[in-house]
Image (cartoon, helix red, strand yellow):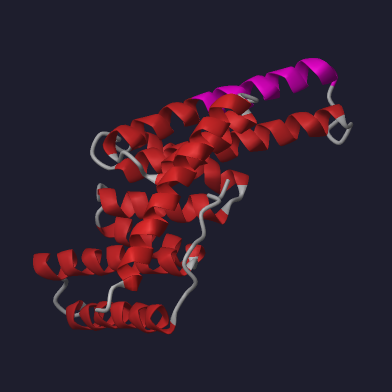
Amino acid sequence: MRPFTPRPRPTMLHRLLVPCCLAPLALLALACSSDGPTKEDRERQIEIHVDTSRAYINMGEYERAEAQARKGLSLDPDNGELKLALARALQMQGTTIKILEAESIYADLPRDEDFRVCLGYAESLERKGLAYAEAADGVRAGERPVDDVEGTARELDETSRKSWARSAQLFREGLEMKPGNTELMNGLARVYALMGDLQEALTWCDATLEIVRNDRVFWKKQLDQEN
């Protein structure tokens, strides 16, 4: 499920930066075609793939971000930043098959070093839970013929609840590393609402809004200053 927080729209600067990232990569490939890349050339190529995949994610060009991350991983299969970029790009495309692939990648990344792993992993499980809940509704509505309608629907519902419970746990893990992060707090509000715990969801909504209000007051004061 895509986060409810707004994503930045691509600017002219974004559109100029991505070709600028790609141009050095093309030049490196040309320079190395005869003698093979040196270690430094290889490291630079990987760095460019990391930067380019991140730039495409910021622009909302998730398929291109995925392609760049995969190219980088073909050079360095163990690169954590490229794995994280690939998982994010897959997750943000939103299809069930890509959400599941993203979940698998996040599951293999260390979560105690970067709150973004917890955030993406939790969001992927949130979306996975929604997919199972929608499948349960489809079974009950007769859109998916099965022998045991209620039994199958209950199993799907149970899987969705387990996904949301795990998602909430991961959002909380992320908050331990990044206290006050509104994306993590907003995620907790969503998954608790999905699980039917409306009081807990409201608690996290209020906490998120309080931070947003304080940020607004701070920036208003900055804007009111003469400089």
Judge by depth and name the residue closer to the eye, 44 or 181.
181
Task: Please determine whether, in this image, residue 166 is positioned above or below residue 185.
Answer: above
Magenta range is: 147-165
- Residue found 66% across the figure and 37% down from its top: 131
- Residue found 57% across the figure and 37% down from its top: 190
Residue 154 falls inside the magenta stretch: yes
Q: In this orientation, does residue 120 appear?
A: no
Residue 108: give x, y in percent of width and height: 34, 35
Q: In this orientation, does residue 126 appear?
A: yes
Instruction: Specify the principal SS of the magenta part.
Output: helix
The image quadrant of residue 161 is top right
- Residue found 76% across the figure and 22% down from its top: 153
Task: Please determine whether, in this image, residue 189 is positioned above or below residue 50.
Answer: above
Task: Please determine whether, in this image, residue 26 is positioned above or below residue 212.
Answer: below
Residue 224: give x, y in percent of width and height: 34, 72
Judge by depth and name the residue closer to the eye, 185 or 206.
206
Quadrant placement of the C terminus: bottom left
The image quadrant of residue 193 is top right
| Residue located farthest toward the right when viewing the structure as drawn | 142
Say whether residue 59 is left or right of residue 83.
Answer: right
Residue 69: give x, y in percent of width and height: 36, 59
Quadrant placement of the N terminus: top right
